[in-house]
């Protein structure tokens, strides 16, 4: 796909979610996002019924992000199987992702967090869009570090949303945001060191992406170390054992 097609796909799946996108096929998940919600819920103020609604919502978001990520990244394999877009095509993938976002939005309405949902979702999409534009050389940022922080919204804004929707205290919300940052740092580093499911070793660098290493002038090994160090630092705040 050309970078313009990728940007168009990102905008299309969001815009279509306000209409009547059609369900096409089941998208499997491990259920890990719902597990994150249930673990974090112990630090929030939501009823058991509301927690289950949020679990349903994040699984819809997980499915949407999963198939759109593979399409944008042009990854052909997911979980050892052909990626959704390889089987169904790009247009159908956008349609399916939009359907999941529409379902997630309805659950946000039931939880009373519609505005928060839209704000964080747009931040996630902005981060993904910026990454594509940078990959294409569309923008040459004067400050790579500051730009990387905008890109990392793909991970940080989503995890922040989980804590906010659960009505967690401010310090927990901030730790959840940093957890997303740490996850992206580690992913950037590990992707440079090892092959990824459906993707060759060092694929982000080969695609010209703005990785943590490029933005901060460190090695992949140092990036992984910093990411894991941050994870350990915030683990107690999130009620986890040190990771």
Image (tube, helix red, strand yellow):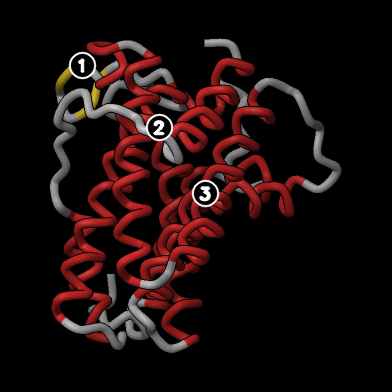
Residue 198 falls in image quadrant: top left
SS for tag 2?
A: helix
Is residue 229 visible in the rendered image? The answer is no
Which residue is identified by label 3?
124
Q: In 3D space, how far apart are the residues under numbered discs 2 and 1 (Cα atoms)? A: 14 Å
**Does residue 1 lie above or below 163 as drawn?**
above
Which residue is identified by label 1?
82
> The C terminus appears in which quarter of the rendering?
bottom left
Q: Residue at x 21, y 65 (%)?
A: 53
Residue 188, x across and y down, in percent: 48, 42
Label 2 crowding class (10 Å Cα cut-off): few <14, some 14-19, many 20+?
A: some
Q: Residue at x 65, y 37 (%)?
A: 130
Q: In 3D space, how far apart are the residues under numbered discs 3 and 2 (Cα atoms)? A: 12 Å
Q: Nearer the viewer, mark 1 or mark 3?
A: 3
Task: Give residue 69's mark.
Answer: 2
Residue 78, x across and y down, in percent: 23, 26
Q: Identify which residue, 14 or 36, lies in the foreground.
A: 14
Q: Which of disc 3 and disc 1 is earlier in sequence? A: 1
Q: Residue at x 23, y 11 (%)?
A: 87
Q: Identify which residue, 66 or 239, lies in the foreground.
A: 66
């Amino acid at each position: 796909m050309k970078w313009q097609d990728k940007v168009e796909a990102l905008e299309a799946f969001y815009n279509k979610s306000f209409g009547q996108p059609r369900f096409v096929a089941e998208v499997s998940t491990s259920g890990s996002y719902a597990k994150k919600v249930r673990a974090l819920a112990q630090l929030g103020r939501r009823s058991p019924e509301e927690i289950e609604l949020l679990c349903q919502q994040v699984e819809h978001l997980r499915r949407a992000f999963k198939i759109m990520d593979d399409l944008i990244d042009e990854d052909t394999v997911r979980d050892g199987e052909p990626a959704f877009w390889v089987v169904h095509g790009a247009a159908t993938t956008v349609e399916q992702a939009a359907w999941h976002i529409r379902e997630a939005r309805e659950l946000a309405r039931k939880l009373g967090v519609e505005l928060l949902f839209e704000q964080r979702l747009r931040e996630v999409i902005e981060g993904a869009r910026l990454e594509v534009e940078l990959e294409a050389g569309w923008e040459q940022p004067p400050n790579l570090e500051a730009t990387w922080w905008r890109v990392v919204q793909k991970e940080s804004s989503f995890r922040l949303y989980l804590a906010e929707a659960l009505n967690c205290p401010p310090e927990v919300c901030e730790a959840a945001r940093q957890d997303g940052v740490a996850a992206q740092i580690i992913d950037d580093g590990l992707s440079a060191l090892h092959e990824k499911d459906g993707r060759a070793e060092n694929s982000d660098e080969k695609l010209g992406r703005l990785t943590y290493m490029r933005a901060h002038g460190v090695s992949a090994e140092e990036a992984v170390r910093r990411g894991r160090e941050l994870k350990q630092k915030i683990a107690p705040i999130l009620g986890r054992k040190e990771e």
